[in-house]
Every structure is written in structure tokens, then in C-alpha cells.
Image: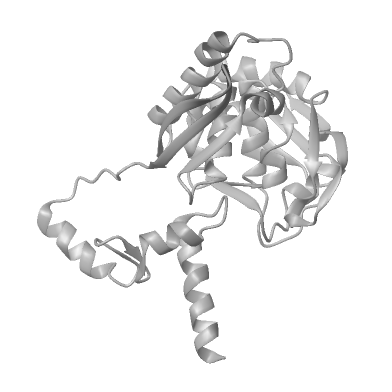
Amino acid sequence: MQDAQVYKANALVEASYRLSLYEQRIILACISQVRRDEPLTDQKLYTISAQQIAEMTGTQLGTAYQNLKAASERLFDRRVTLHEAPNGQGSTRVRLTRWVQTVEYCDKEGAVALRFGTDMVPYLSQLTEQFTRYALADVAKMSSAHAIRLYELLAQWRGTGKREVSIEWLREALQLEDRYTNIRDFKRWVITPAIEQINEHSPLWVKWDQRKTGRRVSHLVFTFGEKARKTTQKPRQRKEQGKACEGNKSASGSIYGIPMEVINAQARPGESRDDAAHRILEKRRNNAKA
């Protein structure tokens, strides 16, 4: 599962739901198994084992085994409230549905198998626009479910480097209900730990600030970007690699010869810089042929 990717419709990223940390890990690990080259049906069974969870998260096998079993028993009852249709197909009625229709715990194998709910399938498969993609490894070692949710909301706007959300909307998305109603508690127990984990475990760095409406803090403003990639190569090796990759990403800040400022300006929400550069390049080529 080292290179596993998570694809979600933006409408699902912004949906209202609450999952525990291990419920999130089960759901995301199964989403990462959805094939991009074939349609997903509600009959497909996905399996994740305690051994895989332990390796993915860097936790003890015994701990993963116990938490996996407990989470699988709760997962069937977890609900999600959707406010939009997938693939930018316009608004939809507010839909309350379930993540899964079947959950099976395989005691001998220490594994969970699940089938996604029928209503969830369009939000996970055949996504052609308005979706968010990130590596499962980006969130694997996070120990806060809030950190995972916040990371997804930032990854959705990866190409812009900034996102502002109202506290009321974020509380609803996280389904906090009557918890952390005091803004100090909300920042202390939800936002600050989530930001710390994103900065520690993900490929993004994040800073945040608050905005007031009158005297009341009403919005949070997140500024973020890609961390510098670590390298252990010697200077000579880096120079040689740069020549080999000249047609792809240059040291001067461009991808496929397209300046980064152009890529950032034209990137769609949830679209990686590489994908945006490729789309811009293809558009230029098609315009040249016309």
C-alpha cells in the first residue's frame, strides 16, 4: 500500500460526518484500493488487515488488531450527510446515507472486509472533475481524525495555497455538535493539534490565522504549501539528475516548461501541480493544432 492513492469527490470531502481515527483508516485504506480503470459497484468487497494497518501507521500489531475489531463494529452505523452531487453535476437534495452496506470482521485473519453503500459509489469512482487526490501515506501516521479531515480540506485547494472557512461550517463538517463550543477549546483541542500533525506527518506545511466578524471570531484562514523535498544526493548527482529531468520539472520553477505562477493560477481545486501542468500543456497543444 506504499503508493496507494485516495480519490474522493470534492462533495464527499466537504460532507458532514464523524469517524474515529481507526474508522478513518479503514475507510481510506479501502478507498485507496478502488481501481481507476474499471467501474466501482456496490458489490465489490474490499479488505484491510491489522497487519497492513500496523505497517502503514507504524503502530504495534496488537494495538492495530484491537482497534480494527472495535472500529469495524461501529462502522456499519456511521452516517454521512452529502450536500452536492459528484462530478460537478449541480446541487442535490441533502442526502443522509451510510458509508458501507456490509462490514465483515474476519477474526482468524485479523482483517475487515466491507462493501461501500450504493449512494457512496458515485463519490468514489468514475470521477472526472471536482475531485481531490492525495497519497494514503500523507495521512497514515496521523493520530487525529480531525487532522485527516483538515488535511483533505487543504489538499482540495492544493493549487491555491490558501483556504478560508467559517468556523460554523467547519464545526458542521466535523459534526462536533455540542463539543468545543468555546472558541478557545475549539482551537486548543481541534485546530492546533490538527495543524501540528499535518506539519509533522504530511507533505504540506500549514500556517493559520483567524478573522473576526465584528468582535466574534468567525473564520479561520489557512495558508499552506509543499514542503521542500529532502535529498541525500551529492551535488554532482543532483546536477546529473537535473539534466535528466529537464523535460519534466526544472530547477527554475517550472513543470513541462510552464512557469509555476501560471500553474498555480490555473490549477483547479484538488488538482496537483503535475496534473495541472499536464492539463495546461495538452490544452496548448490542442489549441496549436486547431
- Residue 237 in the image: x percent, y percent? 15, 58
Residue 64 drawn above or below residue 102: above
Q: Residue at x 55, y 17 (%)?
A: 190
Residue 75 drawn above or below residue 123: above
For this view, does 265 lie left or right of residue 101?
A: left
- Residue 269 in the image: x percent, y percent? 57, 51
For this view, does 101 lie left or right of residue 70?
A: right
Q: Residue at x 49, y 28 (%)?
A: 57
Q: Nearer the viewer, residue 156 or 79?
A: 156
Q: Residue at x 27, y 70 (%)?
A: 246
Work out whether residue 113 can be spotted: yes
Residue that protrudes farthest toward the bottom in the picture:
290
What is the quadrant of the C terminus in the image?
A: bottom right
Q: Nearer the viewer, residue 186 or 46?
A: 186
- Residue 86 in the image: x percent, y percent? 76, 51
Work out whether residue 110 can be spotted: no
Q: Nearer the viewer, residue 58 or 240?
A: 240
Q: Residue at x 38, y 60 (%)?
A: 261
Residue 179 drawn above or below residue 40: above
Q: How many numbered callouts?
A: 0
- Residue 121 in the image: x percent, y percent? 79, 47
